[in-house]
Amino acid sequence: MSQPSSATVYGIPNCDTVKKARDWLSAAGVDYQFHDFKKAGVPEGALSDWLQAVGWETVLNRKGTTWRKLDAALQATVTDAASAAAVMRAHPSVVKRPVVRWPNGRVSVGFSPAQFAALQGATASP
């Protein structure tokens, strides 16, 4: 299977961290596509890949407003990847942003210029 030639940024357009990440990618000349999961949802196959690549505890944003607004009983049900995925599908804003699928297949969550610079030049081998 061939690798995509561009990155895919998953997030919501009004998120400040997503804006910073998109600005960085544009300034660095990285070709990317944007997937707004507020409008288009969290892609099932992609979510599974993210959880496998970086772990559900990295992808689930327990510090955000959406998580804090969830019922405590629902929060308590999140104990593993399957339960976290169910909550992330139902409430896309609890996904930590942005999630980036790099052309080399790697996945990153959140934004830091140093991490993006390293991943931009990384090869597909782990």
Image (spheres, rainbow, N blue to C red):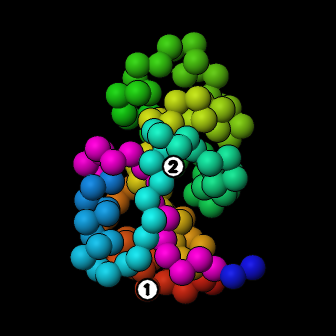
Residue at 25% over, 48% down: 16
Q: Which residue is nearer to you in this view: 71 or 24?
A: 24
**Disc 1 designates what residue?**
121
Residue at 37% over, 78% down: 30
Residue at 31% over, 63% down: 22
Residue 58, label in figure: 2
Provide the secondary structure element on which disc 1 rests.
loop
Can you say whether 29 is above or below 106 in the image?
below
Badge 1 amino acid: Gly
Picture quarter containing residue 114? bottom left
Looking at the rendered image, the quarter that the N terminus falls into is bottom right
Residue 21 is situated, as x and y percent measured from the top left of the image, at 31, 62
Q: Which residue is nearer to you in this view: 115 or 36?
A: 36
Residue 88 is situated, as x and y percent measured from the top left of the image, at 57, 36
From the viewer's perspective, is 36 left or right of 5? left
Q: Earlier in the sequence, mark 2 or mark 1?
A: 2
| Magenta-drawn segment | 3-17
From the viewer's perspective, is 9 left or right of 45? left
Residue at 35% over, 28% down: 65
- Residue 81 in sight from this viewpoint: yes
Q: Which residue is nearer to you in this view: 34 or 77?
A: 34
From the viewer's perspective, is 108 left or right of 82? left
Residue 81 is situated, as x and y percent measured from the top left of the image, at 68, 41
Residue 92 is situated, as x and y percent measured from the top left of the image, at 51, 36
